[in-house]
Amino acid sequence: MTSPIDEMTLPLFVPADRPERIAKAAAAGADAVIIDLEDAVAPEAREAARAGLAKALAGIDAPLILRINTAETPEHAADLAAAKELPLVAVMLAKAETGDACAEVVQATGKPVIALIETARGIANLTEITGASARLAFGSIDYAADLGMGHTRQSLLTARAALVLAARLAGQPAPIDGVTTAVRDDALIEDDCRHAAEMGLTGKLIIHPAQIAPARRGFAPSADEAAWARNVVEAAKGGAAVLMNGAMIDAPVIARARQIIARSEATL
């Protein structure tokens, strides 16, 4: 049985101190709303933001996630207490670096954890983190800063591949990719999502409703890809390897074709 965490593709961040945006985010077409108690809220505003969440989330008809601060921060204990009482499908742990940190959040809140990987240590400990979390997400900007490298596709290639491999080995859904900071560059957003899909990621952290439509297009197979996949499945109905347009169609090719069809149907 799948959960909203498994099926989530485009979760949208909303600052926890802007409660009027939560209902708007839920209606914007995102798959979930991430209420952010970490980077999006000034430290001095976090206590008031937490206090207003129960009222702000009442009646919201969307999967809700709370991003909380790390155990090293003074806000962590209060974040956990709030998360325990709120109607959440998951808690997102910022800068997740160990399996123990994820397990402590689960124990304290009674809710599954999305581990946001944002540091070298988080990448190094992916095996134990996947053992204690429900899904991985990539905080690519913080990760690049942690390593002192550029925030480019080439520099982040190995990290994205490590996340995808760790999730697959743990039997988790594929990871959620990091944000694209450009809010209204539709071509870039779509292309970033297409790159993420090529890498095996199946979601994207969204920071503005305007990003949702191009991101969804980016994760959808192109018309040519979908047509190729349908032709492969049709050609392979006999169950044996066959030639199609001069190319061999066997079990791995058929499996890929079925994945493309599933992606196409999921993004309609």
Image (tube, helix red, strand yellow):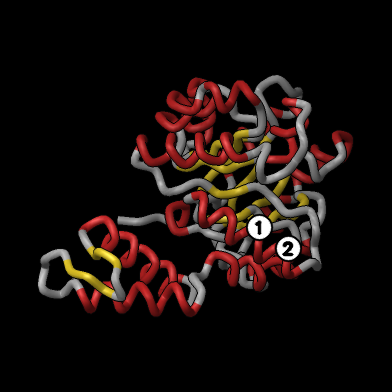
* Residue 211 rendering spot, x and y as whole percentages: 71, 66
Graded by Cα atoms within 10 Å as few (under 14), some (14 to 19) or many (20 or more), the crowding at tag 2 reads: some
Label 2 element class: helix
Proximity of marks 1 and 2: CB atoms separated by less than 8 Å: yes
* Residue 189 rendering spot, x and y as whole percentages: 70, 63
> Does residue 77 show up?
no
Residue at 43% x, 34% y: name it. Answer: 166
| Residue furthest front in the image | 246
Up the image or down, 101 lies above or below 176; here it is above
Q: Of residues 256 and 40, which is closer to you in this image?
A: 256
Which residue position is annotated with label 1? 192
Which residue position is annotated with label 2? 188
> Does residue 247 show up?
yes
Q: Is residue 196 left or right of residue 234?
A: right
Q: Is residue 10 left or right of residue 261?
A: right
> How far apart are the two marked residues, 1 and 2, measured between alpha carbons?
6 Å
